[in-house]
Amino acid sequence: MAEESLHKASPDLFAKGRGALEQVDTLLKEKFSAIELIFLAVAVFIAIRLVSCSIREVFSLKFEEIKCKIFRLALFIPMVKNEVNKEVQKMESDCSKKYSDARKGKTTPNLPNQGVARNDILAKVNGFTAAGKKHYAEGGFTCGALFTKDLGHWDFVADVMKDCITSNPLHIDEYLYVTQMEAEIIRWTLDLYKGNENTCGIVTSGGTESIILAVLAYREQGLIERSITKPNIVCSETVHPAFDKGGHYLGVEIRKVPLLKNFMADVKAMKRQIDSNTICLVASAPEYPFGNMDPVEEIAALAQSYGIGCHSDCCIGSYINPFMEELGHELPSKFDFRVPGVTSISCDPHKYALGPKGCSLLMFREKRLREYQFFANTEWNGGIYATTCMAGSRPGNVIAGTWASMLSLGREGLKK
Ligand SMILES: Cc1ncc(COP(=O)(O)O)c(C=O)c1O
């Protein structure tokens, strides 16, 4: 049709165009065989695709990423490189001065040939820990790290851990009691988070691992149920860096939305970031940087309206959130399995359940989502190898210490 109308509108132009095309055609036929022509066409197609993808990639870069790229390029300029190197060297020497001064006279650079007497070692350890103990016994705080100053509590937890020092839940037959403790910690916490008989969980080494495994579960769910190969997670910019870490390890884009002027998560902007590759939304309850509770109910409802999951990050809220209502404090949002769209929750007993470091929970609304992050190898010549989280062997004594801490506090002790 187009050819016909061009012919009618301008017969001369049409003839010239057709002549030029015929010349190109004969030239190509003279120079290349049919196979070479096919290869040439494929190569041109690939080149066009690559150029268009790179252009698209450049335009999809965020301002911060562009700044980063420009900075990296600037490092090729010798003057800039020298200035940056000078600054890095200064930071390195400040750092090493600060820490090596503090370590002077306390290090053992070479492993001794003969073992050192146990009493001498204990004395050395007491020396290491004295300053820290003095700091918190005298009223000092270590935010996000130390959650009770009750030395009696730590003595008790340490006694339990000592008794279970060799335990390893990887070897379930030998350490059945540890897996029992693990199951109990999970069920107690599911109850606090208003779970039911379908909700379930796993124990991990910390909030970061719980979050990374949540990213894995949603990534696998997206791949298996929706064939998503370029997954992204949408969240507020205050989410814990564990999400960036998970995204980095697992090839998931973490799309962060700037805060509103009142420092709260911007749910409308989150909605604008969702696309067909979004595997879940995140709500922090609360977030670490400012301590605000994201509107979990709103975010979870948004996720539900798109048929995707919502992770409620209760790592720092852990064993405080569930008691706020009972204690008469109104929270801006519910955060637990009462919220219909919440599909997973991370919660850390090594924070406000006063357990030893190295214990967190990742809880799921349904067993199917939990299965997406399990790993099993049934063909290994060492036997069937299956684990619930990232680690293989795990410190059963940490689980025992957590279990004992929670049991000794009870609901009332946690509430205090
Ligand atoms: C909201 C939130 N998420 C995740 C984490 C990570 O926890 P962890 O340090 O146990 O890996 C923290 C730690 O403070 C946190 O506050």
Image (cartoon, rainbow, N blue to C red):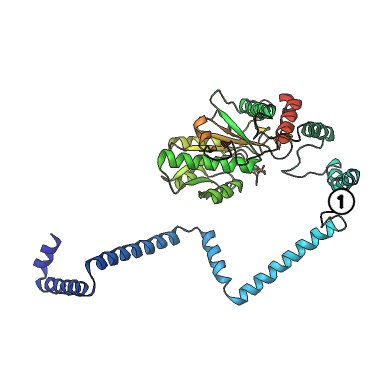
Q: Residue furthest top?
A: 197
Tell me where residue 28 sits by quadrant.
Answer: bottom left
Check the picture and name the quadrant holding the C terminus.
Answer: top right
Q: Relative to the observer, which residue lies in front, 327 or 90?
A: 90
Q: Residue 197 falls in which quadrant of the image?
A: top right
Tell me the amino acid under the disc marked 1: Gln
Question: For the point 67% across and 70% down, which residue is it?
Answer: 85
Left or right relative to 358: residue 201: left
Q: Which residue is mark 1?
A: 114
Left or right side of 277 for 189: right
The answer to whether residue 301 of the structure is visible from this angle is yes
Name the residue rendered at 86%, 51% in the picture: 114
Q: Position of residue 347 (x, y in %)?
A: 63, 35
Viewer-side residue, 175 vs 391 = 175
Residue at (55% x, 27% y) in the render = 199
Taking 34 as reference, is 396 above or below it?
Answer: above
Label 1, residues with CA under 10 Å away: few <14, some 14-19, many ≥20: few
Residue 29 percent location from the top left of the image: 19, 72
